[in-house]
Amino acid sequence: MAAQLSTAIVGHSSSFKWSMARSPLAETYSMAVGYCGRRVSMCSNRFKLGSSANYVKNQDSIRMGLKSLSSKQLKYRAGVCRCATIEEIEAEKSLIESEAKDRMEKTLDTIKANFNSVRTGRASPAILDRIEVEYYGSPVSLKSIAQISTPDSSSLLVQPYDKSSLKVIEKAIVSSDLDLTPNNDGEVIRLTIPPLTSERRKELSKVVAKQTEEGKVALRNIRRDALKAYEKLEKEKKLSEDNVKDLSNDLQKLTDEYMKKIEALYKQKEKELLKV
């Protein structure tokens, strides 16, 4: 029987060519091998079909999930994941620098306007720049409703476009801190600029010094705000620590430049005040 089984196995491995008569045992082995082969084939096919079905099912689930999200949600999620480009970072840096410089320039203009409003021994229309007049219930600047000229070095002439405003203009000048006495003749207002006493010069010099210091404080605050903006970009990983140091140095140079401009204006104004 062992010989018969051996012969059956050899015969099966030789493309089912049998050189001897089949025995019942060989028949049984052949049926078993065929059955197992069919089971393996069926399991393999079932696995393939299951994998394909699962793949299609998963793809359908993804599509349905994406459809359930609104375009706004998709855009938002994409925006969160997108990194800033070099161009965008450079634009943010330029914006911070530009805003800081613009604010410093406006601070300088304010200092100039304040200095011009402080009268010296000479007549200047600029000393009336800060005068506001209550005109038809609204405060307006004097120079917007009247023409101001200097007939000579010690007097000012105020000629309103509307003569009915003469009284309110006169009242505004008297109420100011210019210490001037207007002369209203019904047509124009004349102002005589008296010479400054030494005491008054010192008082005005202190006023100018205070305005100068306020301007410098404003510049420092502008620098501080710009530094905070740079540090924010560093926290967002848009700038490195070295970048922030370089930008801080450039910002300090810009601040020092405007500090020198304010100091130059102050020295010029102080010279005018102390000149007899």
Image (cartoon, rainbow, N blue to C red):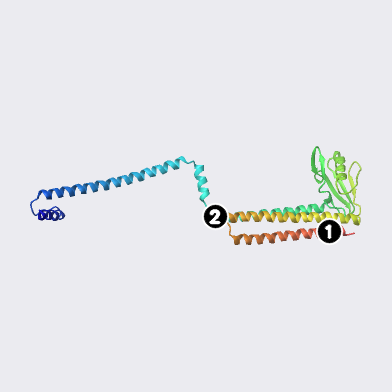
Badge 1 density bin: few <14, some 14–19, many ≥20, Cα 10 Å:
many
Q: Nearer the viewer, residue 26 or 139?
A: 26
- Left or right, 96 with respect to 148, comes to left
Q: Nearer the viewer, residue 133 or 241?
A: 241
Q: Which residue is mark 1?
A: 270
Residue 97 appears anywhere in the view: no
**Residue pictured at 66% horizontal, 55% vertical:** 226
Within the image, what quadrant is residue 234 found in? bottom right
Outermost residue toward the top in this view: 136
- Left or right, 263 with respect to 254, comes to right
**Residue pictured at 52% horizontal, 49% vertical:** 80
**Residue pictured at 12% horizontal, 48% vertical:** 27
Q: CA distance from mark 2 to mark 1?
A: 51 Å
**Residue pictured at 39% horizontal, 44% vertical:** 59
| Mark 2: secondary structure | loop
- Percent across and percent down for residue 102 are 69, 53
Q: Which residue is mark 2?
A: 85
- Percent across and percent down for residue 256 are 72, 61
- State whether residue 170 is above or below residue 153: above
Which label sits on residue 77?
A: none
- State whether residue 130 is above or below residue 247: above
Q: Mark 2: which amino acid?
A: Thr
- Percent across and percent down for residue 111 are 77, 54
- Left or right, 194 with respect to 79, comes to right
- Ranked by sequence position, the earlier of labels 2 and 1 is 2
- Percent across and percent down for residue 12 are 15, 53
Q: Mark 1: which amino acid?
A: Glu
| Mark 1: secondary structure | helix
- Left or right, 106 with respect to 35, comes to right
Within the image, what quadrant is residue 236 found in? bottom right
- State whether residue 89 is above or below residue 172: below
Residue 150 appears anywhere in the view: yes
